[in-house]
Image (cartoon, grey):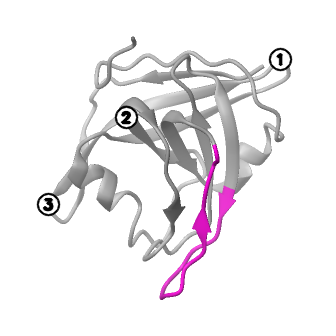
Amino acid sequence: MFVVFVAATILSAAVLGSVTFPHGRAEIRTAHTTVTVRVELASTPAQLQQGLKGRRSLPRDAGMAFLFSADTRGRFWMKDTLIPLSVAFWDRRGRIVRILDMAPCRRDPCAVYDPKVAFWGRTRSEPRRLQALGRTTGRARLDSPLRDSG
């Protein structure tokens, strides 16, 4: 079973151009292990568009949480994202519903990734962090003042 807690205590801002990101922490728990990821929180249109584009590296315990206020469906590409990422998608109740591995793409044509499920958020992280959890899905609870807990 997965349990995710996003503590959105705003500690500082990471600056990429003019886009800043508040920081939080995601804890992804199963019956056998817990993975903690320091996350930058993306919820505004500018933050969601910027994401991790242009980053040349990502610390092992770092990532980004993309937060939405309603069920979302969509396909994604990794255009101008220079590092491989694993992405965990969660639903309105916080249950992780899909984990996808995405390859970097420096120029067109880029692969398009579709989780094929509705989701409220997604967490991107260095692949080995989420691989430790395996590929099962489960229950999660998300706490963040940046989005309605519904």
What secondary structure is marked by label 2? strand
- Ranked by sequence position, the earlier of labels 3 and 2 is 3
Which is more toward the observer, 132 or 139?
139
Q: Circle 3: is it few (<14), some (14-19), or many (20+) Cα within 10 Å?
A: few
Is 95 contained in the magenta span? no
Provide residue 5's location: percent of width, then percent of height. Answer: 53, 20
Q: Secondary structure at mark 1?
A: loop
Position of residue 61 measured from the top left corner of the image (x, y, whole percent): 57, 45
**Residues marked 1 and 2 touching at CB (< 8 Å):** no
Residue 41 lies left or right of residue 105; in this view the side is left
Instruction: Kindly report the secondary structure that dominates the magenta region of the rendered protein.
Output: loop
Residue at the location (69% across, 45% down)? 99
Q: Nearer the viewer, residue 91 or 81?
A: 91
Amino acid type assigned to the residue bearing label 2 in the image: Phe
The kind of residue tagged 1 is Ala
Tell me, for residue 68, which label it has, or none.
Answer: 2
Sequence-first tag of 1 and 2: 1
Magenta extent? 101-116
Task: Point out which mark residue 18 bears.
Answer: 3
Q: Relative to residue 48, is residue 52 drawn left or right?
A: right
| Disc 1: which residue | 31
Q: Residue at x 78, y 22 (%)?
A: 30
C-alpha gap between disc 3 and disc 2: 21 Å
Would residue 105 be counted in the magenta stretch? yes
